[in-house]
Image: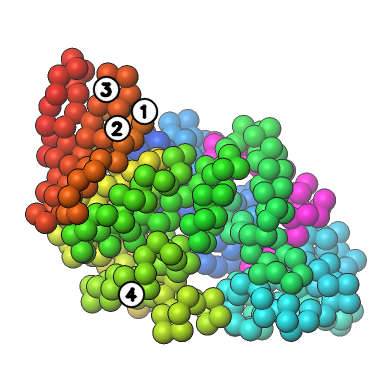
């Protein structure tokens, strides 16, 4: 599956469809995850005003239906929040509790009866903004001040994204309406963005609170399935949460793999990778790169040591990366605050073609359906100009390609090698079977897939950064392929 912004491959949805059908022909049999294409007030689409419209500069619903006719489309639904510029919140901001949409939002008396959270409770909350996750809103018609929950923001007194009360009947009806509309317009899979934040409970971290979170996911999955949608919960957290979510029957994201692969390649040591692949969930999506950075804390906690994580961060920083940092009380150790590393994956491996192909080979032979970010598909390099122009560290890995640039990138040897490997991954029937992680030397990784009489095996020599694939062809004969 391809991951891309709606305007990053040619400029709009119609151009994206053409790129999928021509330049990326046979690459993405698993479909395309189109990052938010709705009208939005910030965070490159992740602060949506509505899910009923497409940002006009990207195209319209006919364009989305056309892509959906050829590919399974994944779209994002920010289940935890909506833009402060949405009609729903603007009505609340004007009329307060008299607004027909007032119950969409979380006034603090919904959590603490007197509306005043004890500092001890605030201190336990997993924060994504300074000091506390609340915002004071002055109601235009009354002058009253309402304190509401806003998980995300760079300032304590401001948030572009307003949290939704997912337990409100008003919110649940709106979610049902959004799901139905998206299903009718070509979308087949919904990624539930920021779902871990929907559980607010006094005296807890207010992040992924059990069992409430599983009850909500069960409800929202049922609602989505009733209109023909699949759901993929998105959560950046300790890997135990992904394992638990998988046991509850959900497909999950493998956010461990990006840093684990770098650790393997940097150190020429495959032991921790092999141990992880033996036990990780099988029904998942794998990534090496996304629109966000390479996850470090909390995703890698207890899988790699902090010293090992620091070594990854330092190597990436030496290769032009910047960091998203984690807030103080959520750090594993006081002297280490890396949350995500912003860098293209091609730069992360030192722009070395053999190492890059080795990384993708590991991803493609790992359990789950591989997702490939568009910059990674083109082996893109750090875009410092975009980073500087936007004042956004993540923009270093968010280059927008013209059609001409795509054509030039497609001619590079590393991209053609990746193309052949991707088509192999799509077509070989053994990947529908079972994975065996083979015992081998520390500096080797050997992964074997088998289904009935079909077989393929990756053998990677980390000391030479060379990989070979032995596989059965259509006649059942063994062949060797060197990506």
x, y (%) of residue 264? 25, 58
For label 1, the crowd category at 10 Å Cα-Cα, with few meaning under 14, some 14 to 19 and many 20 or more, is few
Q: Position of residue 391 (x, y in %)?
A: 41, 78
Asked whether the residues under the numbered discs 2 and 1 touch, taking CB atoms below 8 Å apart as contact, a structural biologist would say yes
- Which image quarter holds the C terminus? top left
Q: Quadrant of residue 329?
A: bottom right
Q: Label for residue 307? A: 4
Identity of the residue furthest to the top in this view? 475
Question: Which label lies toward us, 4 or 1?
Answer: 4
Q: Earlier in the sequence, mark 3 or mark 2?
A: 2
Q: Is residue 250 left or right of residue 321?
A: right
Labels 1 and 3 touching (C-beta < 8 A)? yes
Real-space Cα separation, disc 2 to disc 4, in angstroms:
33 Å
Q: Could you say whether the residue bearing mark 2 is in a helix, strand or loop?
A: strand
Determine crowd level at label 4: few under 14, some 14-19, many 20+ residues with C-alpha closer than 10 A: few
Q: Nearer the viewer, residue 16 or 230?
A: 230
Residue count near mark 3 (Cα–Cα under 10 Å), binned few <14, some 14–19, many ≥20: many
Mark 1 falls on what kind of element? Answer: loop
Which residue sits at x=30%, y=49%? Answer: 274
- In the picture of the structure, the residue carrying the numbered disc 1 is 433
Residue 269: percent from the left, percent from the top? 21, 58
What is the span of residues highlighted in magenta in the rendered image?
A: 161-190
Earlier-in-chain disc, 1 versus 3:
1
- Between 6 and 157, the one lying in front of the other is 157
Tell me if residue 111 comes above or below residue 13 in the rendering.
below
Q: Which numbered disc covers residue 121?
A: none
Question: In this image, 185 relative to 162: left or right?
Answer: left
Do the CB atoms of the residues marked 4 and 1 lie less than 8 Å apart?
no
Mark linked to residue 454: 3
In the rendered structure, the answer to whether residue 320 lies left or right of residue 183 reads left
Picture residue at 67% right of the left edge, 49% below the top: 214
């Amino acid at each position: 599956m391809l991951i891309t912004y709606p305007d990053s491959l040619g400029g709009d949805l119609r151009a994206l469809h053409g790129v999928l059908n021509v330049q990326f022909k046979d690459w993405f049999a698993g479909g395309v995850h189109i990052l938010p294409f709705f009208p939005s007030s910030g965070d490159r689409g992740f602060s949506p005003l509505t899910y009923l419209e497409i940002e006009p500069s990207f195209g319209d619903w006919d364009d989305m239906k056309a892509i959906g006719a050829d590919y399974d489309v994944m779209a994002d639904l920010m289940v935890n929040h909506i833009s402060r510029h949405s009609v729903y919140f603007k009505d609340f901001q004007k009329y307060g509790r008299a607004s027909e949409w007032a119950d969409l939002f979380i006034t603090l008396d919904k959590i603490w009866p007197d509306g005043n959270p004890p500092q001890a409770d605030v201190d336990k909350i997993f924060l994504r903004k300074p000091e506390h996750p609340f915002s004071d809103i002055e109601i235009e018609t009354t002058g009253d001040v309402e304190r509401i929950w806003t998980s995300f923001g760079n300032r304590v007194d401001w948030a572009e994204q307003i949290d939704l009360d997912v337990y409100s009947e008003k919110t649940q009806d709106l979610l049902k309406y959004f799901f139905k509309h998206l299903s009718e317009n070509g979308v087949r899979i919904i990624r539930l963005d920021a779902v871990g934040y929907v559980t607010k409970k006094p005296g807890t971290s207010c992040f992924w609170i059990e069992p409430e979170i599983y009850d909500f996911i069960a409800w929202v999955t049922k609602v989505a399935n009733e209109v023909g949608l699949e759901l993929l919960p998105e959560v950046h957290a300790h890997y135990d949460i992904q394992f638990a979510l998988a046991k509850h029957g959900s497909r999950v994201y493998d956010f461990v793999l990006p840093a684990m692969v770098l650790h393997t390649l940097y150190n020429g040591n495959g032991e921790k990778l092999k141990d992880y692949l033996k036990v990780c969930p099988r029904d998942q999506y794998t990534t090496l790169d996304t629109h966000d950075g390479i996850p470090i804390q909390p995703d890698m906690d207890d899988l790699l040591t902090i010293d090992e994580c620091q070594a990854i961060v330092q190597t990436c920083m030496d290769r032009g990366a910047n960091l998203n940092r984690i807030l103080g009380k959520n750090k594993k150790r006081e002297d280490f605050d890396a949350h995500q590393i912003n860098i293209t994956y091609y730069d992360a491996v030192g722009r070395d073609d053999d190492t890059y192909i080795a990384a993708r080979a590991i991803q493609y032979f790992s359990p789950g359906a591989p997702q490939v970010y568009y910059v990674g598909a083109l082996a893109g390099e750090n875009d410092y100009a975009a980073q500087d122009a936007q004042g956004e560290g993540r923009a270093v890995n968010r280059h927008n390609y013209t059609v001409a640039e795509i054509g030039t990138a497609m001619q590079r040897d590393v991209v053609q090698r990746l193309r052949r490997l991707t088509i192999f991954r799509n077509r070989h029937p053994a990947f529908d079977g079972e994975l065996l992680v083979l015992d081998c030397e520390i500096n080797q990784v050997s992964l074997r897939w088998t289904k009935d009489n079909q077989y393929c095996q990756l053998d990677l020599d980390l000391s030479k950064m060379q990989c070979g694939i032995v596989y059965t062809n259509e006649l059942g004969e063994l062949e060797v392929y060197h990506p």
